[in-house]
Amino acid sequence: MNEFDFSERLEWSKGKRLDDDIATLRSMLDGCVSVEPMEIREDKMGNDYRVILRRGGEILVDAKNRDRGCSRFWKCGPEFALEKWSVLPENGTPGKTGWTLCERKQTDLIFFKFYPEDSTDVFLVSYQLLRVAFRRNLNLWENQFQVARQSSGAWKSECVFVPASIVFCAINDISVSRLVEP
């Protein structure tokens, strides 16, 4: 089981990565006039950046950083760590649904990124489309891809590591349907 410290990860994401993130998001989102890092309280609620568009629109972005060296586990290119459990149910406690399945999450885009030695590719993904694709494919992906637990010391979480190409195919699949009449 991997162990991590939330404060340490937060500090890592606020260093040089902050400047890189801001420049990258500005280049990816047409009409962007500014990218504002969120305050710590909002960051802990699941949003790292507020993107302001030239006509006043706002986009909330949650940045997901992978650990250095993660590419050594990849079989088909970059993988996204999709969280099933934020807090695993244990000893009779119900646990807490992971960010990828959370229907209350107020986020527009997920910004997946890696250490440059692992991949310089970054990915912006619609949160709600990712959530639905993950829910519909969870059982299959748990059987097909690596599932790992992480410990922060106080609680354990669980992620499924899914190749980006598979995630994008699943999002495309759920993005097309047929009209349903009442």
Image: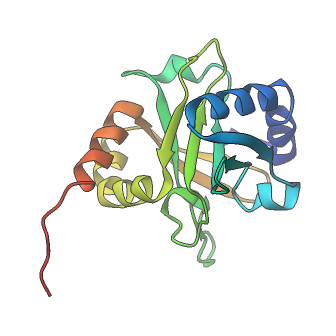
Tell me the residue at 57%/72% (across/down): 104
The image shows residue 115 at horizontal and vertical percentages of 66, 21
Q: Is residue 97 left or right of residue 55?
A: left
Instruction: Name the image quarter holding residue 19.
Output: top right
Measuring from the top left, give residue 150's x and y in whole percent.
Answer: 65, 46
From the top left corner, tell me how far across and down residue 54 is, in percent: 66, 47
Residue 123 location in percent, x, y?
51, 33
Residue 85 lies, with reference to residue 65, above or below; the image says below
> Tell me, what colour scheme is on the image?
rainbow
Residue in the foreground of this view, choosing between 64 and 84: 64
Q: Nearer the viewer, residue 55 or 65?
A: 55
Residue 41 in the image: above or below residue 173: below
At horizontal 80% and vertical 32% (from top left) the residue drawn is 18
As drawn, the residue found furthest toward the bottom would be 182
In the picture, measured across the screen, residue 29 lies left or right of residue 5, that is left
Direction from residue 39 to residue 29 in the image, left or right: left
Image quadrant in which the C terminus is located:
bottom left
Quadrant location of residue 138?
A: bottom left
Residue visible at 64% across and 53% down in the picture: 55
Residue 66 visible in the snapshot? no
Residue 57, compared with residue 26, is above or below; it is: below
Q: Exactly how many numbered labels are in the figure?
A: 0
Q: Is residue 26 visible?
A: yes
Q: Looking at the image, which is closer to me, 7 or 111?
A: 111
Q: Could you tell whether 150 is left or right of 141 in the image?
A: right
